[in-house]
Image (cartoon, helix red, strand yellow):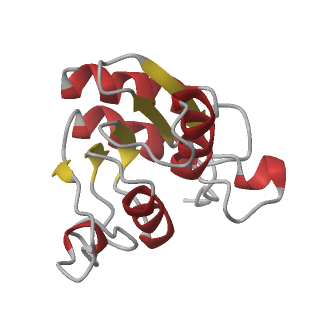
Amino acid sequence: MQDEAAVRAAIEAARAAVGTPDVPIGAAVFAPDGTLLATARNAREELGDPTAHAEVLALRAAARAHGDGWRLTGCTLAVTVEPCTMCAGALVLARVAKLVFGSWEPRTGAVGSLWDVVRDRRLNHRPEVRGGVLERECALLLEDFFAGHRPHSAG
């Protein structure tokens, strides 16, 4: 599985949020053989659920499809934005083998920006990580969303 192709699948999932009140963040989970197990988009507003981040929803669906209970051993998670602490913790607990993400998130990122949950040596599982994959394309999704949600100045 090529990292760019994985992030492109996450971008497609994020685009499904366009036109909704949810921030367009997408995630995709791939089996060890590269088969797509699940995709999801951020749905906190739609579901009224603070845990309905794209990563959590994709991990839940992938665990059902993968067939090893909650374990996603050998799987890859691709996300359009650097995961937050909740999502970083979830992917570590799910035993995801590799995380690939697009844009960095300096305010809430927990994979190197603000914190580095996934590489904490005190944890019993540390996935391989590659950030900044298709970074500009992923960042544009967020920029376009927030540009449409900010009040315009009367200039």
Q: In which quarter of the image is the C terminus?
A: bottom right
User: In the image, what residue occupies the spot 67% across and 62% down?
Assistant: 51
**Residue 61 place in picture, x, y as percent:** 62, 36
Above-or-below relation of 142 to 45: above
Figure disc tally? 0
User: In the image, what residue occupies the spot 62% across and 26% down?
Assistant: 16
Q: Is residue 95 found left or right of 67 in the rendered image?
A: left
Q: Quadrant of residue 10?
A: top left
The residue closer to the viewer here, 5 or 146, is 5
Above-or-below relation of 149 to 106: above
User: In the image, what residue occupies the spot 41% across and 56% down?
Assistant: 91
**Residue 121 place in picture, x, y as percent:** 17, 78
Q: Quadrant of residue 83?
A: bottom left
The residue closer to the viewer here, 12 or 123, is 123
Q: Is residue 74 found left or right of 23 in the rendered image?
A: left
User: In the image, what residue occupies the spot 43% across and 63% down?
Assistant: 93
Instruction: Name the outermost residue toward the bottom.
Output: 122
Above-or-below relation of 4 to 119: above
Above-or-below relation of 3 to 82: above
The residue closer to the viewer here, 133 or 40, is 40
Q: Quadrant of the N terminus?
A: top left
Instruction: Name the outermost residue toward the front.
Output: 68
Q: Is residue 41 found left or right of 22 in the rendered image?
A: left
**Residue 136 place in picture, x, y as percent:** 25, 37
**Residue 19 place in picture, x, y as percent:** 71, 32
